[in-house]
């Protein structure tokens, strides 16, 4: 019937416990705990290799970094390598006591949950200050929480304005929003640009892996490129 939803339930002869049914619906028998967006928000941040991080927490020369962000009410992280163009989004499945398993959701159901690959967030005086990534019990990485990079006024001003693609006629606007930037699409939808560097921004509200790249000639922005994951970039010139 239209609009009907299919739930994954165990089939067995004899009585089935509530715990077994719950495990089948969520796709794992790991001891998953329920955390809402408010409970997940404190984990949302950029974490980086402690090499190249000054005592104030500002990133200088970051060698390795991982960002955890809220995505449709779930904590996620893109684990792709720097050279990859296709995102490798993993959702963090809460197990309690600041420990999460890396997993995959599909239509709201856990379809993959790693027993061995986990993130344990570290606290100092109750504040989350780092994360330890383990694989089969061994520490694979220990990252510290760092401040997001901040655009200078010059870097911000050079991209503010309207941009148009000669190929498909798409026109977008980049506006100031607080101390950052927002991409405004035709129809008025606004998407906050999350800074990776002064010339590359992520668009998590559009979807994992979507990015905006600034093309420079010297220190002047001559174009921006909308980069869908795994697809050719769409270049837009200043209007």
Image (cartoon, rainbow, N blue to C red):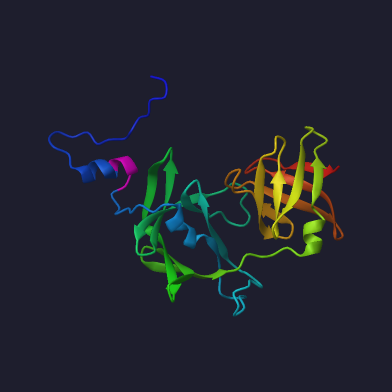
Q: Residue at x 24, y 40 (%)?
A: 21
Relative side of 144 to 137, left or right: right
Instruction: Report x, y in % for residue 39.
Output: 42, 57
Residue 100 to residue 24: above or below: below
Instruction: Report x, y in % for residue 28.
Output: 31, 47
Relative side of 210 to 161, left or right: left
Quadrant including the N terminus = top left
Relative side of 9 to 229, left or right: left
Picture mark count: 0
Relative side of 130 to 149, left or right: left
- Picture quadrant of residue 117: bottom left
Identify the main secondary structure in magenta.
Answer: helix
Q: Is residue 35 visible?
A: yes
In the image, which residues are magenta?
Answer: 24-28
Question: Residue most toward the bottom?
Answer: 55
Q: Residue at x 46, y 71 (%)?
A: 127
Residue 89 to residue 127: above or below: above
Residue 3 to residue 149: above or below: above
Q: Nearer the viewer, residue 90 or 180?
A: 180
Residue 25 colored in magenta in the image = yes
Instruction: Report x, y in % for residue 99.
Output: 38, 62
Instruction: Report x, y in % for residue 86.
Output: 59, 46
Question: Residue most toward the front?
Answer: 178
- Picture quadrant of residue 239: top right
Residue 15 colored in magenta in the image = no
Q: Nearer the viewer, residue 185 or 110?
A: 185
């Amino acid at each position: 019937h239209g609009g009907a939803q299919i739930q994954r339930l165990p089939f067995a002869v004899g009585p089935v416990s509530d715990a077994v049914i719950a495990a089948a619906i969520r796709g794992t028998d790991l001891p998953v705990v329920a955390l809402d967006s408010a409970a997940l928000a404190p984990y949302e941040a950029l974490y980086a290799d402690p090499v190249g991080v000054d005592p104030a927490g500002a990133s200088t020369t970051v060698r390795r970094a991982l960002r955890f962000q809220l995505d449709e009410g779930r904590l996620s992280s893109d684990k792709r390598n720097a050279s990859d163009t296709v995102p490798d989004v993993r959702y963090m499945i809460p197990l309690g006591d600041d420990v999460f398993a890396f997993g995959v959701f599909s239509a709201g159901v856990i379809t993959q949950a790693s027993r061995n690959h986990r993130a344990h967030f570290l606290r100092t005086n109750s504040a989350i200050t780092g994360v330890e990534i383990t694989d089969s019990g061994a520490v694979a990485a220990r990252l510290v929480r760092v401040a997001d990079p901040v655009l200078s006024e010059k870097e911000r001003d050079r991209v503010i304005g309207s941009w148009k693609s000669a190929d498909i006629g798409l026109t977008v606007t980049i506006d100031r929003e607080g101390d950052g930037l927002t991409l405004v699409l035709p129809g008025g939808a606004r998407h906050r640009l999350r800074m990776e560097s002064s010339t590359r921004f992520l668009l998590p509200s559009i979807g994992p892996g979507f990015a905006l790249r600034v093309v420079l000639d010297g220190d002047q922005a001559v174009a921006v490129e909308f980069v869908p994951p795994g697809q050719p970039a769409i270049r837009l010139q200043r209007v």
